[in-house]
Structure formats: C-alpha cells, structure tokens
Image (tube, rainbow, N blue to C red):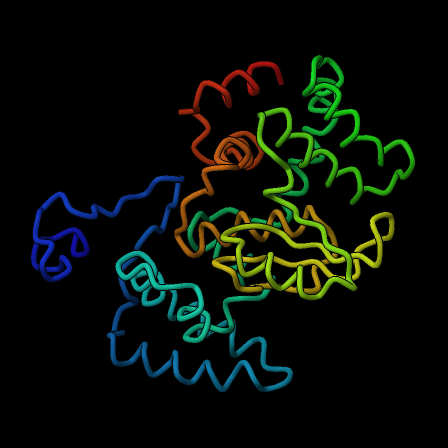
C-alpha cells in the first residue's frame, strides 16, 4: 500500500494508477514489512557490513543471517525502484550465488527452489517424453533431434536438459533463446553474444560434441552466475532469479516459463494461458 500510495509515486508521474505494484506469480512475501525495531538506517548499515562479510572466508552463517534480516529492505528496493541488474549486484553481491538464490526464493514464495524444480521435472519427464514422441510435422522432427542425445547418454543431467529444450520446442519457442552454446576458442563471439543477451543460459564447450567447460546465467548482458554443473540447475537458478529480481518473463520464452511456474513448480496453477492449459490437460 505504501509503494502504491500517491505520495510515494515517482516525481512527475502522479497518476494513482501509474506503475501499480502487485503480486503476479504467487509471491507470498512480495513486499513484506521490516522486522520490528529495524529502519532504513539500521538495515542500510547491515547492507554495508555485508559488502565486507562476503569477502571473508568461512563466513556463510553470518552472511545468511544478515541476508535474512535485510530481506524486506532489499525486496522493497527491488519492487519500488526496479534497479538495473549491475547496480543491484554491486549493492547486494551476496545474493548472486546458488545458496542465496535458493534462500531468497524460499523467502518470497515459502517454497524450495532447486530441489522442487529438479524433482518435479523428473516426475513429469516420462509424460512429457510421450507427448513429444506423439508430435508430428516439423515440430516433431525438431523434437527428435533435440531428444537424440538421450539415446546415446543415459546421464540424468543430459535427460533433464533434453526435456527442457523439448518443452521449448513443443510450445513453439526456440530453445536457443534459453540455452546458448559457444565454442571456447571463439572468445570474441562469446563476449558479443553475452552482451546482447537480456535473459538466458550460456554454455561454453571445447567443441560442439564435448561436455561443457563452463555454464552460467546472463541477465541484461552481464554474467550473473558461472560454473554451474548442468543446464537443469542453470534453468532452476534462472527461474529463481526472475522471482528474486522481480523480472518479467522474456517474451520469446513466456510460454516455457509459464509452464515451469504453473505446471512444474505448481505456483498459481489455476489460471493458465490456452497453450499452457492444453499441455497440462494432456499431461
């Protein structure tokens, strides 16, 4: 209510209906109040302390405690100010690592991120694969190519990656917009492509057939995370960051992320687009 109040509007944009902030994706703690006894001054002091704490070794417990205390302060900043990713990362560097993304997502939704994302993907994989096999036409042929690595490699991570890419294709979206693969030697092309990417996962390989040498997440042309183990984990972290940073789903992948949210994670699964509802019914 405070964020949406007229006196809290940005100067020069005083329409009551301008820039209304509201939950869109089942955020339980979309913009929670400060803890009792805390203020902007005390929480800003903790934020500054965190800048030093993250540089210390074996200091995870202290960082976790202070991140928990500053959650409402940080969330208010994200929702009200919609900062650029680079600026926000400089202010909250502790947030941009796997454990803290998991923790922040749970603070927002009360639901675990990584464990639920991967387990639910595994639960739905067999049914999704059956749907993919039944699809004909050009999409069916694309799905065959996407799923081909599963016949050569029974690794669970390979299977999850193929299912995620297949989901994009089944929803008539391009998996290259989700996962972008590069050859390690082409450094200039990698840098240029990352700078042009608003939202996505990057994978660096020695050659087209080798296993990834590096994998991470790009937001607003910046490498936010690096050194992730597999594409499914990267997809989970990307999904979590869209919640953590209160970002819209990229238009070219809006159906894929809607299905990940409402069908896989079961967050607000009662109101679906026609395309997502058809998929859910078939499952």
* Vertical side of 24 occupied by 195: above or below: below
**Nearer the observer, 63 or 84:** 84
**Quadrant in which the C terminus is drawn:** top right
Furthest-right residue in this view: 152
Residue occupying image coordinates x 51% and y 33%: 266
Q: Is residue 24 left or right of residue 94?
A: left
The image quadrant that residue 154 belongs to is top right
x, y percent for residue 88: 41, 68
Q: Position of residue 249 (x, y in %)?
A: 45, 42
In the image, 71 versus 181, the foreground residue is 181
Count the labels in the image: 0
Residue 42 lies in quadrant: bottom left
Residue 198 against residue 226 in the figure, above or below: above
**Vertical comparison of 223 with 25: above or below:** below
Q: Does 219 appear above or below 17?
A: below
Q: Quadrant of residue 71?
A: bottom left
Front residue of this view, candidates 191 and 140:
191
Rendered residue at 40%/25% (across/down): 271
Residue in the foreground of this view, choosing between 122 and 90: 90
Left/right placement of residue 136 relative to residue 259 reads right
* Whole-percent x, y for residue 199 in the image: 52, 51
**Residue appearing at x 56%, y 20% in the figure:** 280
Q: Position of residue 102 (x, y in %)?
A: 55, 57
Q: Is residue 42 left or right of residue 191?
A: left
Residue under the image location 73 percent in, 54 percent down: 182
């Amino acid at each position: 209510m405070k964020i949406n109040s007229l006196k809290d509007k940005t100067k020069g944009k005083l329409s009551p209906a301008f820039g209304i902030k509201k939950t869109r994706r089942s955020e339980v703690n979309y913009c929670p109040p400060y803890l009792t006894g805390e203020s902007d001054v005390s929480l800003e002091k903790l934020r500054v302390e965190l800048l030093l704490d993250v540089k210390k070794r074996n200091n995870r417990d202290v960082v976790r405690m202070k991140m928990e205390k500053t959650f409402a302060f940080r969330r208010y900043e994200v929702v009200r100010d919609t900062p650029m990713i680079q600026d926000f990362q400089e202010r909250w560097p502790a947030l941009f690592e796997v454990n803290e993304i998991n923790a922040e997502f749970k603070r927002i939704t009360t639901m675990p991120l990584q464990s639920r994302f991967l387990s639910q993907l595994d639960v739905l994989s067999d049914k999704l694969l059956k749907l993919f096999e039944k699809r004909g036409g050009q999409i069916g042929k694309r799905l065959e190519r996407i799923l081909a690595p599963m016949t050569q490699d029974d690794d669970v991570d390979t299977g999850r990656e193929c299912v995620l890419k297949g989901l994009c294709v089944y929803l008539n979206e391009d998996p290259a917009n989700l996962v972008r693969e590069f050859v390690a030697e082409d450094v200039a092309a990698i840098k240029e492509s990352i700078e042009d990417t608003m939202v996505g996962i990057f994978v660096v390989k020695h050659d087209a057939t080798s296993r990834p040498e590096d994998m991470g997440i790009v937001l607003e042309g910046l490498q936010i995370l690096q050194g992730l183990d597999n594409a499914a984990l990267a997809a989970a972290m990307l999904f979590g960051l869209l919640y953590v940073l209160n970002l819209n789903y990229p238009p070219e992948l809006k159906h894929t992320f809607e299905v990940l949210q409402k069908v896989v994670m079961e967050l607000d699964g009662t109101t679906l687009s026609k395309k997502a509802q058809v998929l859910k019914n078939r499952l």
